[in-house]
Image (spheres, grey):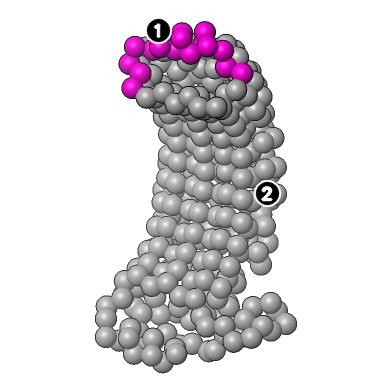
Amino acid sequence: SSHEVEQLLRRFCVRKLSVMPEEEKEVSGGYPNQRPLTWKVTPSLQVLCLRSCSEEIVKSFFSVSPKLRRLQVVDSKIQSIPSNISQNLTSLSLTGITNLPDEQLSKLLMACQNLRSLYIAKCHISHISFALPQLELLSVTHCRQLTDQCATEILSPANNPCLRFVDLSECRSLTAPTVEHPELEVAWLMHCPQLTGQAVSAMFRACTSLTAVNLVQSSIENALLASSSLRTLELTTSQKLADGAVTQLLENCPNLSFLDVGHCCQLVEPRLAHPILETILLSFCVNLRESAVAGLFDNCPRLRYVEIAV
């Protein structure tokens, strides 16, 4: 019961807490009928996860948790974050928040000016905007209505100058966002099947600090992937990927050490040559010729691991 939980909280200095209220029965609004809770002894909380909570429960925690630094809200109703909390948050995760329109969510995010990590997943957003001067990690995933313009704006160095890591996986409506961030080091764009080769090429040209890129299940065919800083590239299940693109990326990414082109069924005879490549995955490249594999062993002197399976 809530009383037993409160008694337990009084005995300990709780810094991390995950809450999923007991469900009694469904009500007309779609949320379970949750008993009133009054959490009076949680001032030491720094990390809080709220799952399937009503707006009243969310507010009750906010009112007694002034020291929160990391907040995760999953499948719950939230309207805003009090200023005394939002100003202290360094990490915010919102999953399945479907009650907030874009404008209100943007306002909520703009209030969290000290965020270093922001995770948004499975939210009904298309065009949010925010400028967070300390944000280093941005993950916006499974948001299938996200527009190119929105992605362009939130990845702009003018709005979020400290970004190092970006994940836009499963944002399937993206086609040609502009990604031009000189500080960006890691970009995950998995399962974005409409992303154009031109947009990917432009990202590689403009993001001069990239070290790792994940383009699993992309639709790129002959995009020029060139980066002097890149070390890891994952292109598995990119079904249109052509020989020329692989040959060129190996020529134009001099520091590459890991390459995954597994399940890229259009590959036939790319020139697999690289002076420092250590790992390459070629599983289920069913049309790859033996001569290409032979060239790999002849022209990659630092190879340590090769995966070939059909």
Instruction: Locate residue 224, reporting x and y percent.
Output: 58, 18
Q: Identify the residue at horizontal 69%, vertical 84% (top origin).
A: 27
Answer left or right for 39 relative to 199: left
* Camera sees residue 92: yes
Between 289 and 13, the residue placed more toward the observer is 289
Q: Amino acid at mark 2?
A: Arg
Q: CA distance from mark 2 to mark 1?
A: 44 Å
Image: magenta residue range = 287-304
Where disc 1 sits, the SS reads helix
Residue 3 among magenta residues? no
Q: Identify the residue at horizontal 50%, vertical 27% (top origin).
A: 309
Q: Residues within 10 Å of mark 1 (few under 14, many from 20)?
A: few
> Which of the two labelled residues, at mark 2 and mark 1, occupies the earlier sequence position?
2
| Residue 243: numbered disc | none
Instruction: Locate residue 206, reporting x and y percent.
Output: 52, 25
Where disc 2 sits, the SS reads loop
Q: Residues within 10 Å of mark 2 (few under 14, many from 20)?
A: many
Q: Is residue 246 above or below residue 6?
A: above
| Residue 298: numbered disc | 1
